[in-house]
Amino acid sequence: MARSPHILIVDDDREIRSLLQHFLTEHGFRVTPASDGKGMMAALKNGRFDLVVLDLMLPGEDGLSLCRKLRQETSLPVLMLTAMSGETDRILGLELGADDYLTKPFSPRELVARIKAILRRVGPGAASSEAERPTAYGFEGWTLEIGKRHLRSAEGTLLPLTSGEFDLLLAFVEHPQRILSREQLLDITRGRSTLLFDRSVDVQVSRLRRKIEIDPNMPELIKTVRSGGYIFTPAVKSFAAA
């Protein structure tokens, strides 16, 4: 029997924690609540989770700081909750590694849909046809391992990627030397059901460039196409599944 996804909810509002725990449990998730960063870190030490729902405004260490810490220590997907509708806060959250965001007040049904969309991208279900697709892609000395969701350098060093960065790079290596618009990249990596804005693609591209380009300010691998989108320039080699 498949293991139910385990969600860690970090929010200082007891009513919201209780509501989300009840609603997510009804939809087949296992849920652990935490009220602040200390509770989150304690839960992570004692349990195995599939995704963190993280509130931006928390007492003590705030959600942005905790998201940064999570990205430094794990590739665990993060869905950020924010009471702020300003674009700056959403972009900052994505830059720090959040996989998606949701502005309060929100529908619990939409939260479930967002969680399921993220888990489809990063969970076992996303690789249902694994035997029919390559297990890795190689380009410019880099190796992108599909099953493990790892990126390795020519020296074999593992370079941590968030799930959003991995999905974006996978989209590029699967469509090399082809112009991809922001809309196409959103469709490929996240799906229209997530209702993300185009600027999020630019944020993820910028973060990815800082990790794989020799000079991120003069990118050679991921080039911007004026009024078009982006193009992944290297030749890409795929490795067939065994």
Image (cartoon, rainbow, N blue to C red):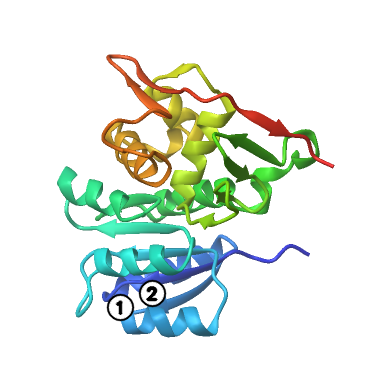
- Give the residue furthest to the right: 242
Say few, some or many: other residues with alpha carbon within 10 Å of mark 1 (under 14 / 14 to 19 / 20 or more).
few
The reply to whether dot 1 and dot 2 touch (C-beta < 8 Å) is yes
Residue 193, by quadrant, is top left
Image position of 157 (left or right of 86)? right
SS of the residue under disc 1: helix
Query: Callout 2, which amino acid?
Result: Ser
Residue 165 at x, y = what percent?
Answer: 44, 45
Query: Callout 1, which amino acid?
Result: Arg
Q: For mark 2, what is the residue?
A: 18
Residue 213 at x, y = what percent?
Answer: 39, 38
Image position of 80 (left or right of 61)? right
218, 114: nearer the viewer? 218
Residue 230, by quadrant, is top left
* Residue beneath the point at 72% across and 41% down: 135
Q: Quadrant of the C terminus?
A: top right
SS of the residue under disc 2: helix
3D distance between C-alphas at marks 1 and 2: 6 Å
Label disc, if present, on residue 84 of the rendered structure: none
Image position of 241 (left or right of 238)? right
Q: For mark 1, what is the residue?
A: 14
